[in-house]
Image: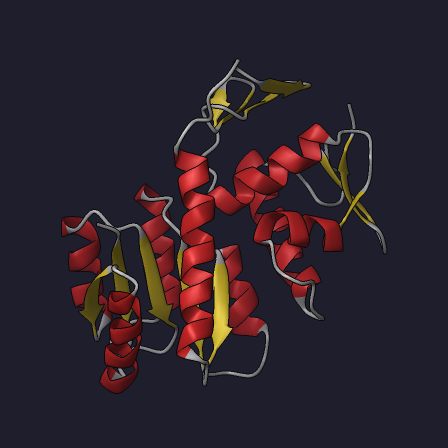
Amino acid sequence: MTNILIVDDEQSIAMLVEVYLKNEGFQVYKCFDGASALECIREVPLDLAILDIMLPDMDGLSICQKIRENHTFPVIMLTAKDGEVDQINGLTLGADDYITKPFRPLELVARVKAQLRRANSYNVPTKGPDTTLTIRGLTVNTDSHECRLNERPLALTPTEFEILRILCEQSGKVVSSEELFQLVWKEKYYENAANTVMVHIRHIRSKMKDSAEHPKYIKTVWGVGYKIDE
């Protein structure tokens, strides 16, 4: 059974989301503060976490950062703020998606399913011959979903892996933010989607120890998109 963690100090919201997720056959674990959430993360083999940013003892962004120290399962952030600062910070720390309160429970369920599909395709190797993309010391194995840079493994989230895979497969070509978003998130492009792509690119560069100003790999083509030269 798929295990999903909900962390929200507004118990009514957590219980409402629980009802909708259980109706889809998911096993749900609820926590109302950061301490119990961290304990659950240590003890339960989770498949996805839904984290509220504002919690009584610690913020959801810190929990997300803790998760990314040892886990790659998808993380969806909940934010009650209209601004994009929390959203961008969350994605930079390794979150895969965010949704702003108030939200429709069915929309959250749809995003949960989309993230789980992406994670499953990441974790389950496809059948057929081994396919490895190699570009100047960067290797991306699309069967085993492993990525290495100069023989050093890169701990990428499923979303980050998909972005890097697409850029490598289309090496030498500019891939627009809109195309990347639609290929990776499989959703209709919206106004702030470019920010979502941008912070994931920033996080990949950080893991590759690459520079945005003088990149060795992922180059920004301003006003167009991103590319990796062969």
Q: Is 128 situated left or right of 53 in this image?
A: right
Farthest residue to the top: give it: 129
Residue at position x 25%, y 60% in the image: 25
Q: How is the image coloured?
A: secondary structure
Instruction: Identify whether 166 is placed above or below 116.
Output: above
- For the question of whether residue 95 can be seen, the reply is no
Tell me where residue 190 appears, x and y as whole percent: 69, 68
Q: Is 50 situated left or right of 188 in this image?
A: left
Instruction: Identify whether 107 is placed above or below 10.
Output: above
- Quarter of the figure with the C terminus: top right
Residue at position x 46%, y 21% in the image: 127
Q: Quadrant of residue 56?
A: bottom left
Q: Is 38 situated left or right of 173 in this image?
A: left
For the image, the number of numbered tags is: 0
Q: Quadrant of residue 58?
A: bottom left
Tell me where residue 171 appears, x and y as whole percent: 76, 29
Tell me where residue 212 appears, x and y as whole percent: 71, 45
Instruction: Identify whether 61 is placed above or below 52.
Output: above
Foreground: 155 or 15? 15
- For the question of whether residue 196 can be seen, the reply is yes
Tell me where residue 91 appears, x and y as whole percent: 52, 59
Residue at position x 23%, y 83% in the image: 11
Residue at position x 62%, y 37% in the image: 164
Instruction: Identify whether 230 is placed above or below 67.
Output: above
